[in-house]
Image: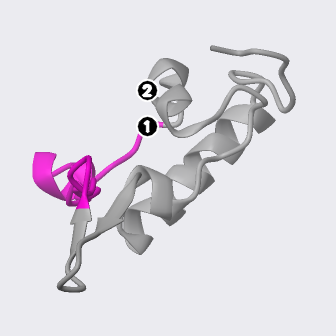
Amino acid sequence: MAVITNDKGEIRYLNPPVLDVMRTKYCRFKKMRMKHIDYKDPEFLMRFMNEQGKILPRRLTGNSIKYQRKVARAVKRARHLSLMTFVGDMLK
């Protein structure tokens, strides 16, 4: 971003400064009023995992702490029952 100062000492920008607009995060489980997270549905649980098979953190998914724990428990149960893989190369 180029900055120009004039003789009065005012700062002027050639391009307008870009302001990052943060989207508000919300817990999709609270919004949809889900009480139970099914460990037998691996396609749904894949939304909360990255390509390497790691569980995504709350700060990325927007889940509340209560439902993040339930998601983690469901993913671990699905892995234990071989419904999901523990480690995967490019799962998605």
What residue is shown with label 1?
Answer: 38
Q: How many marks?
A: 2
Q: Does residue 63 sit above or below 51 in this rendering?
A: below
Q: Residue type at mark 2?
A: Phe
User: Where in the figure is residue 44, as x and y percent of width and height?
Assistant: 43, 26
Q: Nearer the viewer, residue 54 or 67?
A: 54
Residue at coordinates 63% horizontally, 42% vertically from top-left?
A: 75
Could you tell whether 64 is left or right of 40 in the image? left
**Local secondary structure at mark 2:** helix
Q: Residue type at mark 1?
A: Asp
Q: CA distance from mark 2 to mark 1?
A: 9 Å
Q: Quadrant of residue 6?
A: bottom left
User: Where in the figure is residue 28, as x and y percent of width and height?
Assistant: 24, 49
Q: Quadrant of residue 46?
A: top right
Could you tell whether 3 is left or right of 19 in the image? right
> Which circle, 2 or 1, is nearer the viewer?
2
What residue is shown with label 2?
Answer: 44
Q: Looking at the image, is mark 2 or mark 1 earlier in the sequence? A: 1
Prevailing secondary structure class for the magenta stretch in the rendered image: loop
Q: Quadrant of residue 7?
A: bottom left
Q: Does residue 24 sit above or below 75 in this rendering?
A: below
As drawn, which residue projects farthest toward the front?
7
Q: Nearer the viewer, residue 66 or 39?
A: 66
User: Where in the figure is residue 62, as x and y percent of width and height?
Assistant: 36, 58
Q: Nearer the viewer, residue 52 or 73?
A: 52
Magenta-tinted stretch: 13-38
Circles 2, 1 touching at the beta carbon (< 8 Å): yes
Residue at coordinates 47% horizontally, 63% vertically from top-left?
A: 59
Magenta highlight on residue 36 = yes
User: Where in the figure is residue 21, as x and y percent of width and height?
Assistant: 22, 56
User: How many other residues sit within 10 Å of disc 2, few (<14), some (14-19) or many (≥20)?
Assistant: few
